[in-house]
Image (cartoon, helix red, strand yellow):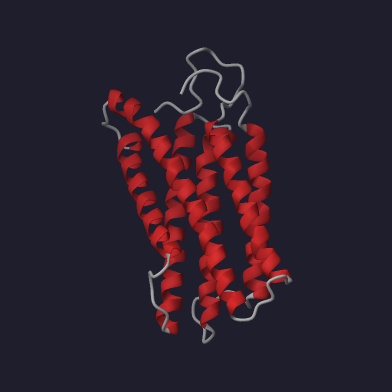
Amino acid sequence: MGGPGLGVKAAPFTYVAHVLAVAAAVLVLVWCIHFRGGLAFESANKNLIFNLHPVLMLIGFIIVGSEAIMAYKVLPWSHDVNKAIHLVLHGIAIVLGIFGIYCAFKNHNESGIANLYSLHSWLGISTISLYTIQWIFSFVTFFVPGAAPNFKRGALPWHVLFGLFVYILALATAQLGFLEKLTFLESSGLDKYGSEAFLVNFTALIVVLFGASVVVAAVAPAQIEETPGYSPLPDN
C-alpha cells in the first residue's frame, strides 16, 4: 500500500472521530437512561438489563475498538508501546462486547424471548467471533516472539484488510440493531416522529460518520510528505 495514499493526513480524521465518539456515547446513554429507564444487570424490569446491550456494544465494543485502530495514528509513543496499546484496547473491546451480547441473551432468557432469530443477532455473533479470531491470530503473529519476519510482512496487509472488514461489519450490525429496536418500539406505540425516535436515528447516523472517520484515519498516512516506498500501515 505504497505511494502518497489519500493525499491527506490521518490526524484531522482522528480529531473528528473523537468528537463523534463523545457525541455517540452521550446520545446512547441519554437514550438508555432517560428514555428507556436506566441500566441494571439484575432487575424485575428486564428492559433495564437489555439497555446494557446497546451501551456496551457502542461504547465498549465499537468506540474502544476504534481507539485501538487509531492508536498508531494518535499516540506519540514508540511503535512497540503503541502496538501493545493497540492489542490491549482490542482485547478490552472483545471482553465488553461479549458481556454486551450476554446482556441481550440474559434479557431474552428472563423475558421468554427467543434468541438468534434476526439478522442483527446472526451478524452480531459472527462479528464478535471474527473479531476474537483476528485478535488471537494477531497476538500470536505480531506480539509473541518467534514468527518469521517474512511471514509477518506478508500477513500484515491481510491483518489490516480483515480488521477493517470486521470493523465495518460491526458498524453495519450496530445499524441493524438500532433499526430493529426502534422498529419494535414503534410497533408498540412509540411516536414515529417523536423525540426518542429522532434521537435513535440521529445516534445511528453519528455512528456511521464516526466509523467513516475511523476508516479514513486508519488508511491515511500520518504525514503527507512521504518517500516513494512509504506505507501508512505500521511495520511489525
Question: Residue 179: where, in percent of width, then height?
Answer: 56, 64
In-image side of 155 versus 170 (left or right): left
Any part of residue 99 in sight: no
Question: Where 122 sits versus 172, above or below?
Answer: below
Residue at the far top in the pictured view: 228
Q: Residue at x 47, y 47 (%)?
A: 167
- Quarter holding the C terminus is top left
Question: Residue 230: where, in percent of width, then height?
Answer: 50, 18
Question: Where 150 sits versus 16, above or below?
Answer: above
Q: Residue at x 57, y 71 (%)?
A: 183
Q: Residue at x 41, y 58 (%)?
A: 123
In-image side of 46 versus 154 (left or right): right
What is the total number of numbered labels drawn onto the structure image?
A: 0
User: Which corner quadrant of the image does residue 117 belong to?
Assistant: bottom left
In-image side of 215 versus 209 (left or right): left
Q: Residue at x 65, y 61 (%)?
A: 201
Question: Where 58 sits versus 116, above or below?
Answer: above
Q: Nearer the viewer, residue 79 or 197?
A: 197
Question: Residue 21: where, in percent of width, then height?
Answer: 63, 51
Question: Residue 60: where, in percent of width, then height?
Answer: 52, 57
Any part of residue 51 in sight: yes
